[in-house]
Image (cartoon, rainbow, N blue to C red):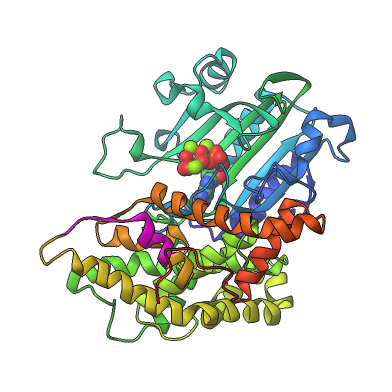
């Protein structure tokens, strides 16, 4: 049965409300008062403190559709976007949570009932994993649910022990549900064939600041299911970007393109690349629009720098598609048409969001063309017939310093040409430059009693304003 993204959201929440859960709104993507985390990367983030202290939770059972971003930090999928069928920087996670209300058994039973009776997915297309040592979960799946033991796979902690990040926080063993993509390139024993779509985490531990695991007094449940992946299953699509809401945005990108096609690539190869660029633009529009709507602004540090990188990557992909002028503002109406129903903030904050996106793309536009030209020079100076090479740390830093190319953008472009970037070299050159600058600032600043991070912030603000602080030794032009 075909189901739209909207219908999947509704059915999920309705089902868990019927199971006694309270429906709560998505928390922000910029976690409130959580400095340990760049962005909300899972549905459990807004509830983090309740896992350690379930008595404080206002609802023992809750269900949400959470806006998530996985760009930067431990869960960073930025480089995957456009290249795998299933990763986005922005995505929605459907979740149900128990703060001491139910256990592993009930969580597995409800998940299975939802998958079989609401989504109506056939058992022969499904497979689950459990932590290798979790005999209890294995027994629930095989003996109580009655799943064929060949469909229940034991996995090590790298796959089946979930934590939000490397730092402090709740964590525990998990069981995951997979869908058979039936991709003919992979055999049934090949992991690549199986699409992970739902993770059920048994929150049993709290990882302390020292890295040690402490058992929680009351085990909790946290599950997360990717909306876009379920949509791909329910709509019979092999790629998330072909599902209803994302497809509409991708079509919006295509509508902005001139007939002439992808810059610097001909024929079939150009077509393949165009598909990837369109997906990148569509994904990055969602991430940047939701971030700006929550008040994040492009900058050179922290969250603001992730936003800046996302917008600049999108600008470059748009330019490669031959789109002139800022691509994200032009595409905004497609986003609003596709997702404005579920997310009223897209219409409410349209004005300021579009302005911020436009301003950032404008700032970058000229530098983008000059940087692309410089890169083209590097690629061609390697000599005709050279199809691979490495961009030096000094060149990558010059692109960053002079043209505002984040190093990961240089990497993406290099990858398109079959080249690498000496990222370590880049960081070395950058550190040297920073140290030089800091050493010379420290004098005045320390006299004024300014803490180090404020010095850095001031330096960043300077750079943003276009003020070149001091010659760093590698800048050209
Ligand atoms: P994968 O192994 O595919 O990268 P994951 O194991 O990192 O996924 P979890 O941390 O278990 O993902 O998150 C729970 C669910 O959220 C996943 O099962 C998937 O449905 C969804 N999800 C995770 N990352 C992404 C992403 N980058 N884009 C879209 N959906 C995602
Ligand atoms: Mg992942
Ligand atoms: Mg996984
Ligand atoms: Mg997972």
Compared to 266, does 410 lie above or below?
above
Frontmost residue, 16 versus 157:
157
Residue farthest along the left direction in this orientation: 385
Residue 26 in view here = no
- The quarter of the displayed image where residue 348 is located: bottom right
Residue 289 in the magenta stretch? The answer is no
Residue 381 in view here = yes
Q: Left or right of 52: which side holds 301?
A: left
Frontmost residue, 207 versus 11:
207
Residue 282 percent across, percent down from the top left: 48, 68
Frontmost residue, 467 versus 385:
467
The residue positioned 38% from the left and 52% from the top of the image is 84
Q: Left or right of 117: which side holds 104?
A: right
Magenta residues span 387-398
The residue positioned 55% from the left and 13% from the top of the image is 135
The residue positioned 51% from the left and 23% from the top of the image is 157
Residue 422 percent across, percent down from the top left: 35, 51
Compared to 75, does 285 lie above or below?
below
Residue 371 percent across, percent down from the top left: 38, 73
Which corner quadrant holds the C terminus?
bottom left
Residue 254 percent across, percent down from the top left: 39, 78
Number of numbered tags placed on the structure image:
0
Compared to 241, does 325 lie above or below?
below
The residue positioned 43% from the left and 19% from the top of the image is 149
């Amino acid at each position: 049965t075909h189901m739209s993204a909207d219908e999947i959201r509704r059915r999920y929440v309705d089902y868990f409300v019927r199971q006694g859960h309270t429906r709560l709104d998505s928390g922000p993507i910029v976690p409130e008062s959580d400095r340990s985390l760049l962005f909300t990367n899972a549905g459990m983030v807004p509830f983090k403190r309740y896992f350690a202290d379930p008595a404080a939770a206002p609802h023992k059972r809750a269900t949400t559709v959470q806006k998530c971003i996985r760009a930067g930090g431990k869960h960073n999928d930025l480089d995957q976007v456009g290249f795998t069928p299933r990763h986005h920087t922005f995505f929605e996670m459907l979740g149900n949570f128990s703060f001491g209300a139910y256990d592993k058994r009930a969580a597995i039973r409800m998940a299975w009932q939802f998958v079989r009776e609401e989504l109506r997915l056939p058992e022969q297309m499904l497979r689950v994993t459990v932590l290798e040592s979790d005999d209890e979960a294995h027994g629930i799946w095989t003996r109580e649910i009655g799943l064929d033991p060949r469909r229940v796979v034991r996995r090590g902690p790298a796959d089946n022990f979930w934590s939000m990040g490397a730092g402090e926080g709740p964590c525990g063993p998990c069981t995951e549900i997979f869908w058979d993509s039936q991709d003919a390139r992979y055999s049934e024993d090949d992991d690549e064939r199986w699409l992970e779509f739902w993770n059920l985490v048994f929150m049993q531990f709290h990882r302390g600041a020292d890295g040690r695991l402490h058992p929680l007094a009351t085990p909790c449940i946290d599950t997360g299911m990717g909306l876009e992946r379920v949509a791909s299953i329910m709509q019979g699509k092999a790629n998330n970007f072909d599902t209803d809401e994302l497809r509409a945005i991708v079509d919006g990108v295509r509508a902005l393109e001139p007939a002439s096609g992808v810059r610097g690539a001909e024929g079939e190869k150009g077509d393949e690349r165009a598909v990837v660029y369109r997906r990148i633009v569509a994904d990055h529009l969602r991430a940047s629009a939701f971030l700006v709507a929550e008040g994040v602004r492009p900058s050179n540090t922290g969250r603001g720098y992730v936003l800046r990188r996302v917008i600049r990557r999108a600008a470059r992909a748009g330019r490669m598609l031959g789109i002139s002028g800022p691509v994200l503002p032009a595409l905004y109406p497609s986003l609003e048409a596709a997702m404005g129903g579920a997310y009223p903030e897209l219409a409410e904050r349209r004005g300021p969001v579009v302005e911020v996106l436009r301003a950032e793309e404008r700032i970058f536009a000229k530098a983008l063309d000059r940087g692309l030209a410089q890169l083209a020079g590097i690629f061609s100076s390697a000599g005709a017939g050279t199809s691979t090479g490495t961009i030096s740390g000094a060149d990558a830093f010059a692109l960053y310093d002079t043209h505002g190319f984040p190093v990961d953008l240089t990497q993406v472009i290099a990858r398109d040409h079959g080249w690498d970037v000496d990222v370590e070299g880049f960081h070395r050159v950058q550190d040297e430059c920073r140290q030089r600058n800091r050493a010379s600032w420290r004098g005045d600043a320390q006299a004024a009693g300014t803490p180090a991070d404020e010095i850095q912030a001031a330096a960043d603000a300077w750079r943003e304003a276009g003020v070149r602080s001091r010659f760093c030794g590698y800048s050209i032009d």
